[in-house]
Amino acid sequence: MENILINQSVAILCDGNNIERSIHELSQTENAMINFDKLIPKLLNGRGLNRLIYFREGKSISSRFAERLHENYYGSVIPCHKSADIPLSIKATQLASKVDTIIIMSGDSDFVDLVSHLKREGVRVEIAAVRKTAAGILIDEADHFHEITREDCFIYKAPRKPMPKKAREH
C-alpha cells in the first residue's frame, strides 16, 4: 500500500491583545512575548502555513516584530480600531474557502459563534491559547486545542529609561 501525503493548508489568526494579556498573566511580567519561532512549528505540526495575521488594537506594535513576522512567515500585522474580534472574524470568513484549517490564537469566548460557523463551512478550527485564561466554551467548540505555555514565550529586557537630568547632576 502506498503512503498518501496529505497537505493541509493552515491560516493562523492571532488576537494580539488577548494573547498578550494571557502571556503577561502566565509569566507574571509585562515583558513577555510569544516566541513565534517556537510556537508556529508546534501549531503547524508539518502542515503548510497559508498565512499568519496578527490583529492588534491600541498602541502601535513594534516595526521590528512586524518585519520578523513578515520575513519568517509572510505574516502581517493588522492594526484594529477597537477590538480584534470583528476584523479577525471577517478575515476568517474570507479565508474559509481557501484553507483547510484555521487556528485562532485567542481564548476569547466572543469567537464561539465564529468557530461554529467555520466548522459548518467545512473548515477545521483549532484554538491556541493559555488554558487558564481561555473560555471553556471556546475550547469545547473547537476541533482541537493547543495550549500555549511558558515554554512558548520569552521574556525580554525592557529598555532602561534614562535617568532624569537632575539626578545625573548630583
Image (spheres, helix red, strand yellow):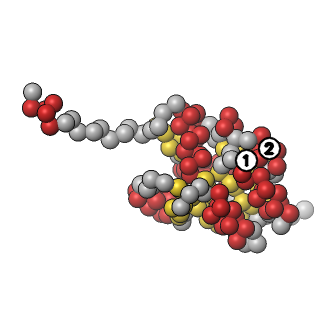
Q: Is 123 on the left-hand or right-hand side of 74?
A: right
Quadrant where the N terminus lies? bottom right
Q: Are marks 2 and 1 in contact (CB under 8 Å)?
A: yes
Q: Closest to the observer: 37 or 70?
A: 70
Q: Amino acid at mark 1?
A: Ser
- Residue 51 in which image quadrant: bottom right
- Residue 169 in which image quadrant: top left
Badge 2 is on which residue? 137
Residue located 58% across and 33% down the image: 26
Residue located 44% across and 61% down the image: 67
Q: Is 169 on the left-hand or right-hand side of 66?
A: left
Badge 1 is on which residue? 109
43 shown above or below 80: above
Quadrant where the C terminus lies? top left
75 shown above or below 28: below
Residue count near mark 2 (Cα–Cα under 10 Å), binned few <14, some 14–19, many ≥20: some
Q: Secondary structure at mark 1?
A: helix
Q: Is 161 on the left-hand or right-hand side of 39?
A: left
- Residue 115 in the image: x percent, y percent? 78, 56
Q: Give the residue at the far right of this rendering.
A: 1
